[in-house]
Structure formats: structure tokens, C-alpha cells
Image (cartoon, helix red, strand yellow):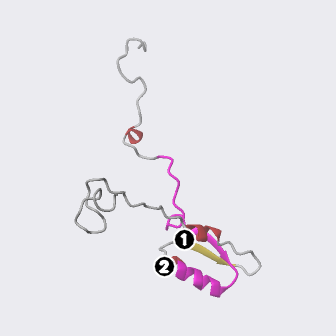
Amino acid sequence: MSKFFFKGRIEKKPKHASYGYNTKRAAKLGTETNPLPLTVNSEEKKTEVEVLLEQHQLFAIITVDSEAEENMEELETMINKPTTTVFDKTPNRNDPCSCDSGKKFKKCCGK
């Protein structure tokens, strides 16, 4: 059929993409399906790391190798994630004042 006389979509759109399903999602690191790969030098350090993982509810595969260099960068980045700063909304002129005086903001602290 000619594309000039067709009143619709010629090629069908996949159904999963039309409903917003993300097909190119990256697996989250630190979960049961995708654990963190960590390398430590001693058994004592391994127990410290296991306690840290339990506190933050993360999963990891820990290998103990005394000759290898410690690889803890991925764990540190998962624990020290930056938090979003939230600013308080400034009151409008006719809102009650935040100092609990009972007056409007424009007559109390807004001067």
C-alpha cells in the first residue's frame, strides 16, 4: 500500500516502549543480583566490611588476598552518596508568619 494514502502508523510501535517501560536500564550495583566486587587484605578487614554492608543494606562479593591491592572505591561511593539539598519555601505576603506571632508575614517579619 502506498504511504501517501495510508492514514495510520505504517510500522507498528512495540507495546512495551509505548507504556514507558525502560528497556535500556542499567542494573543497580550493590543488590543481590549485581553485588559489589570488593578486595581486602585481611580477615579482620573483611569482618569490618561485612558489618558496614549490613548497616547500609548492600550486597558484595568479598575476596581476601594479602598480595593484591585493596579495592574499596565502589563501596565508598555507594555509602557516601551526596544528598539533595532542600530549601524552605519563602512565605508569600499574606501567609502567616513563621515566628508564630499570629500576624501576616507582610506586617511582621516581611518589613
Tag 2, which secondary structure? helix
Front-lying residue, 105 or 3: 105
Image quadrant occupied by the N terminus: top left
Residue 91 in the image, given as x and y percentages of width and height: 32, 57
Q: What's the mark number on residue 79? A: 1
Neighbor class of circle 1 (other Cα within 10 Å; few <14, some 14-19, many 20+) is few
- Region in magenta: 23-52
Task: Find residue 86 and report its image quarter.
Answer: bottom left
The residues bearing labels 2 and 1 have C-alpha atoms spaced at a distance of 10 Å
Residue 76 position in % (x across, y down): 60, 71
Residue bearing mark 2: 55
Residue 74's quadrant in the figure?
A: bottom right
Q: Magenta includes 45?
A: yes
Name above or below for residue 52 compared with residue 19.
below
Instruction: Look at the numbered disc 1 and give the secondary structure of its residue.
Output: helix
- At x 38% / y 38%, what residue is drawn? 18
| Quarter placement of the C terminus | bottom left
- Mark 2, other Cα within 10 Å: few <14 / some 14–19 / many ≥20: few
Number of marks in picture: 2
Q: What amino acid is labelled 2 in the image?
A: Gln
Q: Nearer the viewer, residue 97 or 19?
A: 97
Name above or below for residue 23 compared with residue 41: above
Tell me which amino acid carries mark 1.
Answer: Ile
Q: State the residue at coordinates (53%, 82%).
A: 51
